[in-house]
Amino acid sequence: MSERLKITRGSGNVFRDIGFGKDEAENLKLRAGMMMRIEDFYEKSGMTQAQAARALGLTPPRFNALLKGKITLFSLDALVNIATRAGLSVRLLVKKAA
């Protein structure tokens, strides 16, 4: 193991690090976070997927797509609505970039 490894510090946004533009990467990061919170709600709820889908106003196939992380199928607006139906409080903090 005489080879040296090159380590590159990440930006804090995996989507930016894999090549998405700044705007799209930020949107994807927000959507991914929302999807994870909705999945946490489901896992803690004790409901079946069908029950959770109904409670969140989704069809079972659409809810399954959310659980599988199919991020391109969900807008930020749609995820805010789903999270609200799950009883989650959604806040958006806007501040000057570092």
Image: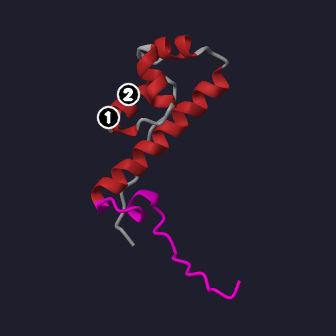
Label at residue 77 = 1
Q: How is the image coloured?
A: secondary structure
Q: What residue is rendered at 64% in x and 21% in y?
A: 45
Q: CA distance from mark 2 to mark 1?
A: 6 Å
Task: Work out whether residue 44 or residue 9 is closer to the camera in this orientation and state it.
Answer: 9
At numbered mark 1, what does the secondary structure look like: helix, strand or loop?
helix
At numbered mark 2, what does the secondary structure look like: helix, strand or loop?
helix
Stretch of the chain drawn in magenta: 1-22
Task: Tell me residue 5's x, y (percent).
Answer: 60, 81
The residue under label 2 is: 81
The type of residue carrying mark 1 is Asp
Position of 14 relative to 6 (above/below): above
Query: In the rendered structure, are the residues bearing label 2 and label 1 in contact, judged by CB atoms less than 8 Å apart?
Result: yes
Task: Tell me residue 98's x, y (percent).
Answer: 39, 73
Q: Quadrant of the N terminus?
A: bottom right
Position of 98 relative to 73 (above/below): below
Task: Tell me residue 25's x, y (percent).
Answer: 35, 56
Task: Work out whether residue 58 or residue 89 is closer to the camera in this orientation and state it.
Answer: 58
Task: Tell me residue 80's x, y (percent).
Answer: 39, 33
Decide if residue 8 is in sight here.
yes
Q: What residue is rendered at 42% in x and 35% in y?
A: 70
The type of residue carrying mark 2 is Asn
Q: Residues within 10 Å of mark 2 (few under 14, many from 20)?
A: some
**Occupied quadrant, residue 62:** top left
| Relative horizontal placement of residue 23, taking residue 8 as reference (left or right) | left
Name the dominant secondary structure of the magenta segment: loop
